Amino acid sequence: MGIPTVEVLEVCVPSTVFLYNNVRKVENGEKARGTVVFAQGAKIAEAVAKYHDSTAKNASEAFNIFGKYAKESKVLDYAGKGVNWATHNVNPLICASGVYKTLTSDDKVHTGITQLGAISGMFLGEGLMKMNMSKVINEQNITKLAEGLKDAKGIGSIAQTLLKNNNGGKAAAIIKGIAFVCASMASYSLGERLATKVADNLCKDMGVEEDNNNTPMTKIDRMV
């Protein structure tokens, strides 16, 4: 089938990595992340269907069939709208999973603070990447780099490949996707670590700690 288009790569590269990461989170017990997995998968499918001609045709036919029956069934109609909403609202689902994790935690104060810090850090990192990434990682810069390396030993063949058939733009899309994911995960991790320290100190000041069974205890509990 060849290398996908730039538009597909820009959506699918980061979404695929995020999908894998969220599957791992579900496997590790964060059940609420299942909705995020679903949304990321739907987002990938939508991108492929939209930009890949042969797939788009099949998807269009399938959607027409779905739409036909959706008119006759409110359940299917609501389901279709739900898929569409989830596909374009991954971030609210991530926030919702953080709220769910907090509400189901034995230590809601500590978990709430760490989740707020982690998600806030993630959004900040992603926002900075979106603002500046395209200024550095773009087709023009990748093409210039490939031009300068096309005669270099070892990587010359790779550089020459990038110079053919708009591959510079595709390479830029892949690099941007990977860079965005790395920044997002690093920002989430940094935000979580910083928030954990704040949560530890705050819970200590509030007199909240955990017993050996990981059940939160307060000063009153310890006095009984």
Image (spheres, rainbow, N blue to C red):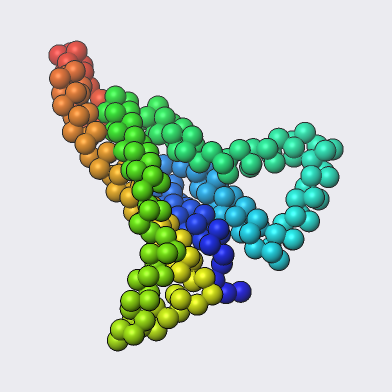
Measuring from the top left, give residue 105's x and y in whole percent.
Answer: 35, 30
Can residue 178 be seen in this snapshot? no
Residue depicted at 29% across the width and 28% down the height: 113
Q: Between 210 and 164, which is closer to the camera in this rendering?
A: 164
- State the image quarter where residue 56 is shown: bottom right
Does residue 73 sit above or below 65 in this rendering? above
Residue 94 quadrant = top left
- Image quadrant assignment for residue 120: top left
Q: Nearer the viewer, residue 14 or 25?
A: 14
Report the residue at 39% width, 84% height from top: 157
- Where residue 71 appears, as percent x and y from the top left, is 82, 38
Of the pair 209 and 66, the residue shown nearer to us: 66
Q: Residue at left 55%, top 58%?
A: 7
Q: Quadrant of the N terminus?
A: bottom right
Figure quadrant of the C terminus = top left
Q: Is residue 132 visible?
A: yes
Question: Residue at 48% of width from left, 65% of height from top?
Answer: 169
